[in-house]
Image (spheres, grey):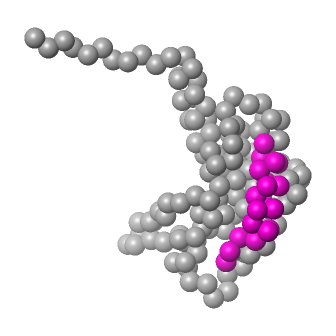
Amino acid sequence: MRIPQVPRIKTVQELALEAEQTRFKNSYLFIDTNFKRKSEPIIVLAFIGYKRRIHYNKIGNLYFKSDDEILEIISEFVKEDYFTCDGIVPIWGNIVSYNWHHVDGNIYVFNKNGSFKISTRNIVESKATLSIKGKELTVKGNK
């Protein structure tokens, strides 16, 4: 005789963590270089575009933090990232600023020293894409 399995019940902590992961799913840090395309092949730009977009989980633990704490963590990350890469993103150029796409829909702009500049909802970020027969191809990667 086979004993039926009882489904595992998630703990309150597991449910809270899942809710935080869902809340942050569209958050990321974009590195702005004011890039203007000259002769760079579009396919190359599409394949290295991820180098300017940093997924939130690469920044540090942002879960269960206040907005002020999150912005402080972002500020510290920006300072470290700028120092680590000497202010340059290969092919894309010199870093001008970092744009944090927050869970509240606002974009928080930090200068290269990690200082908060402005909060807005209207920033256009350049992006190269590839498509075949009208279907956009996605390139996976993360800095």
Most foreground residue, 18 or 137:
18
Return the residue found at the far left.
1
The dominant secondary structure in magenta is: helix
Return the residue found at the far front.
84
Q: Position of residue 6 (x, y in %)?
A: 30, 14
Is residue 105 in view from this perspective?
Answer: no
Is residue 81 in view from this perspective?
Answer: yes
Question: Is 14 drawn above or below residue 108 in the view shown?
Answer: above
Q: Position of residue 125 (x, y in %)?
A: 69, 63
Most foreground residue, 76 or 102:
76
Residue range (magenta): 73-91
Most foreground residue, 128 or 70:
70
Viewport quadrant of the C terminus: bottom right
Q: Residue at x 66, y 68 (%)?
A: 126
Question: Is 111 drawn above or below residue 42 in the view shown?
Answer: above
Viewport quadrant of the N terminus: top left
Q: How many marks?
A: 0
Q: Residue at x 53, y 22 (%)?
A: 15
